[in-house]
Amino acid sequence: LLPSWPRPLRHGERVHLHTGTSEVVGRVLLLDRDELHPGQEAYIQFRSEAPLVVGRGDRYIIRSYSPVHTMGGGAVIDPHGRYRRKSLRDLEELRARESGGAAGVVAQTLARSGPVPLALGELSRQAGIPPEPLEKELQDLAAQGEVRSLEGGYWIHRRGYGEFVAAARAFLEDYYRQYPLRVGVPKEEFRRKVVPGADARGFAAALAAAVAAGDLALDRDRVALPGREVRPGPEEARALERLEAEVRAGGFSPPTVAELTERLGRRDVEELVLYLQEQGRVVRLASDFVIHAEHLAEARERVRAFLQAHGRMTVAEFRDLLQTSRKYALPLLEHFDTARWTRRVGDDRMAGPAL
């Protein structure tokens, strides 16, 4: 603020900002104080009321809102950052950005992103450094162990990677307490819960690095802790045995999850069914019917033999083939279509490519 300015600049004061050929109105947010006195310097964040394009190092002038007089000016340190007031960590970051050169800016930009990886283009935008010199700075920082290169052109700070792994492991440990029969968490659900700010490719890159390092594991499409083994306790084992027996007894007229819940008198039947699904012992159909995998395999063999002999099959023929009712035949046929065991031709079914 100019020494000749007659009064302090207040936090949130509305001003005119001039930079290059642009002029906008906005508010000055003082990051470390409530008032800036004449002759003093401070870090500010400018909240513009209109779009404004600036780059790191650009000079600006601030003028009072009305009447319009020059109050002071400065230089842009971070054109894209959002900083909290009176935060020691944010103020330290600003000082590092101001004095640390390009390498300091790159490292601080990635550090601020935390567990969320940044693609080269987004990192270039946030750091205000063109891609070509940025890549050189990244390679130097990677050689020092300060940042990590991820697949797909993504980058993450070493502390950010540590935050990702710590958050992932804490989430999984809590998840296992809630769902002791589950091996892991579907990847997309995991991303939404652990790093909601990451895009799909950035998350996949961080996850691949964590799996390669042995910090996390993948079980098909599920994220898990390394060495995770699901071992039902004695009570759960008895419940699973009874549940499987109920499903097996249903044959081609399978029970629903609600019916199984009523028969077993347990609140965790959904989890038990999911466990048996993961083991490949039952299959959940549309309308929540649960059929035993052995019966489904038998149905597939019957349909294969029928279609080899006749070429086409109606819903009624499918129903009679399994000696069941239309209520059960339709969700079973839907599963056959989805699995590409059959394909629909008009109202009939013919052999699918996977039959």
Image (spheres, helix red, strand yellow):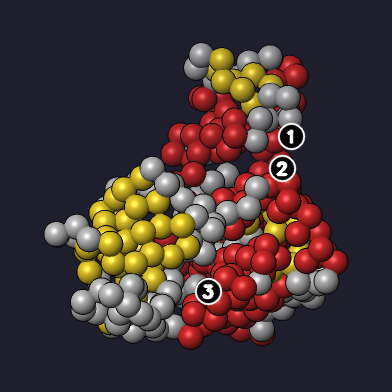
Kind of residue sitting beneath label 3 = Leu
The residue at the point 47 percent across, 63 percent down is 75
Looking at this view, is 227 or 59 the one in front?
59
Q: Are marks 1 and 2 in contact (CB under 8 Å)?
A: yes
The residue at the point 51 percent across, 14 percent down is 346
At mark 2, the secondary structure is: helix
Is residue 133 visible in the rendered image? The answer is yes
Labelled disc at residue 60: none
Which residue in the protein does label 1 denote?
Answer: 301
Which residue in the protein does label 2 denote?
Answer: 297
Q: Nearer the viewer, mark 1 or mark 3?
A: 3
The residue at the point 71 percent across, 65 percent down is 103
Which mark is first along the chain, 3 or 1?
3
How much space separates mark 1 and mark 2, taking CA atoms?
Answer: 6 Å
Classify 96 as above or below 21: below
Q: Position of residue 62 (x, y in %)?
A: 32, 61
Kind of residue sitting beneath label 2 = Ala
Q: Please tell me in which quadrant of the rendered image residue 128 appears.
A: bottom right
Looking at this view, is 161 or 331 the one in front?
161
Q: Position of residue 274 (x, y in %)?
A: 59, 62
Q: Position of residue 317 (x, y in %)?
A: 56, 24
Q: Position of residue 36 (x, y in %)?
A: 31, 80
Kind of residue sitting beneath label 1 = Glu
Question: Please, which residue is most extreme toward the front here?
Answer: 4
Which residue in the protein does label 3 denote?
Answer: 94
Q: Residues within 10 Å of mark 3 (few under 14, many from 20)?
A: some
In the rendered view of the protein, which quadrant contains the N terminus? bottom left
Q: Residues within 10 Å of mark 1 (few under 14, many from 20)?
A: few
How much space separates mark 1 and mark 3, taking CA atoms?
Answer: 69 Å
